[in-house]
């Protein structure tokens, strides 16, 4: 692989674009495939098969050829509401996973640069913050403040936008009250039941890193359960 | 569907190149049977034999390192190697899991 190709791959990963690397295994020549980008003459012959790999987000050698296709998918957007202690560990765990975390917290002293270096922190109320973030059914929400003023608007947004994962921190009692409020706000039982509350898989621990681990574990599991 | 694991191996390869090391990318391109790692899994090797990442569960990495050093010494751009089930002989490199994998080696140049 040419150093230039390696550099462009890293750049594209950084810029969160979806692409594939096409390698001729005989010559060692490789190039980058993107939607609406013209392939080289040599690779053009295989464009429909490459397109197929790209669509199904698969890696592999095109049948009866020496052409290898490696696709790069977009990281999954995870919105964390509450720049709390657990969120600091979530950020750590997510570093080795393909999750892109954004943190929302209107409380400036929580959402500080010092507590979350190199993190995208939106120091606004959820309703305002969501105007800045594009969200869809491939987005996940982790609500951690257990303060209705902050969590509820975010949960409502996530339900309406059909996030594939919605989790909310809080005891069973806190969650019951939360469900009641959402019901009063006009949400259906099905919508309310889509919230994972209390959040996370049962691990037994109650410390911040243990809760963060249980949330990340549930998030990974639900990511594979999609579709 | 690809998994949500981002290994950042290519980023590391770039760091090694910037540190004036010769780097070979070793990528799993095909698997048959129960192989330990998916197609697209990757490790990187430099001329000294330092490596990062993996192409199996530790079964064939040492052989891959040797092959990569050879590729750098012979100054070849690329090579394909296949690994099959290991037999009884302890010194033979192979996959104890019963799978087969094809690994593609390519120099960054």
Image (spheres, rainbow, N blue to C red):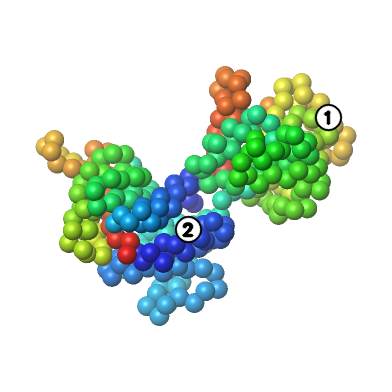
Q: Nearer the viewer, residue B32 or A177?
A: A177
Q: Is residue B39 visible?
A: no
- Left or right of A149: which side holds B12? left
Q: Residue at x 69, y 44 (%)?
A: A121
Chain-order first, disc 2 or disc 1: 2
Read off the residue under disc 1.
A180
Q: Residue at x 55, y 40 (%)?
A: A94
Rendering quarter of residue A222: top right
- Left or right of A165: which side holds B38? left
Residue B22 is situated, as x and y percent measured from the top left of the image, at 29, 57
| Image height of A85 relative to A2, above or below | above
Residue A184 is situated, as x and y percent measured from the top left of the image, at 88, 34
Q: Total label count? A: 2
Q: Nearer the viewer, residue A46 or A94?
A: A94
**Residue A150 has which mark?**
none
Q: Which class describes the residues within 10 Å of circle 1: few (<14), some (14-19), or many (20+)?
A: some
- Left or right of A32: which side holds A162? right
**Residue A10 has which mark?**
2
Q: Element under label 2?
A: helix
- Left or right of A114: which side holds B28? left
Q: Residue at x 69, y 31 (%)?
A: A84
Q: Is residue A72 visible?
A: yes
Q: Element under label 1?
A: helix
Residue A31 is situated, as x and y percent measured from the top left of the image, at 41, 69
Q: Which class describes the residues within 10 Å of circle 2: few (<14), some (14-19), or many (20+)?
A: some
Q: Chain of mark 1?
A: A
| Image height of A76 relative to A70, above or below | above
Marks 2 and 1 sit apart, C-alpha to C-alpha, by: 47 Å
């Amino acid at each position: 692989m040419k150093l230039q190709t390696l550099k462009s791959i890293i750049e594209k990963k950084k810029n969160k674009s979806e692409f594939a690397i096409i390698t001729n295994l005989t010559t060692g020549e490789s190039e980058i495939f993107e939607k609406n980008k013209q392939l080289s003459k040599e690779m053009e012959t295989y464009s429909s098969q490459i397109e197929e790999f790209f669509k199904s987000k698969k890696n592999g050698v095109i049948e009866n050829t020496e052409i290898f296709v490696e696709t790069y998918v977009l990281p999954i957007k995870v919105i964390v509401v509450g720049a709390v202690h657990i969120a600091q560990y979530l950020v750590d765990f997510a570093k080795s996973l393909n999750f892109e975390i954004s943190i929302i917290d209107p409380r400036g002293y929580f959402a500080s640069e010092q507590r979350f270096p190199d993190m995208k922190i939106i120091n606004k109320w959820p309703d305002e913050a969501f105007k800045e973030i594009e969200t869809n059914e491939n987005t996940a929400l982790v609500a951690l403040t257990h303060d209705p003023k902050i969590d509820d608007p975010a949960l409502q947004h996530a339900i309406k936008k059909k996030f594939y994962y919605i989790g909310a921190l809080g005891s069973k009692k806190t969650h019951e009250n939360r469900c009641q409020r959402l019901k009063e706000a006009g949400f259906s039982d099905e919508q309310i039941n889509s919230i994972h509350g209390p959040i996370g898989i049962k691990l037994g621990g109650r410390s911040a890193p243990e809760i963060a681990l249980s949330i990340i574990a549930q998030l990974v599991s639900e990511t594979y359960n999609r579709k | 569907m690809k998994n949500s694991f981002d290994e950042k191996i290519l980023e590391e390869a770039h760091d090694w190149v910037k540190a004036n090391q010769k780097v070979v990318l070793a990528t799993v391109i095909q698997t048959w049977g129960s192989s330990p790692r998916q197609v697209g899994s990757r490790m990187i090797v430099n001329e000294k034999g330092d490596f990062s990442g993996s192409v199996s569960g530790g079964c064939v990495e040492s052989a891959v390192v040797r092959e990569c050093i050879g590729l750098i010494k012979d100054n070849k751009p690329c090579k394909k190697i296949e690994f099959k089930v290991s037999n009884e002989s302890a010194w033979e490199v192979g996959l104890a899991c019963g799978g087969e994998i094809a690994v593609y080696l390519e120099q960054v140049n």
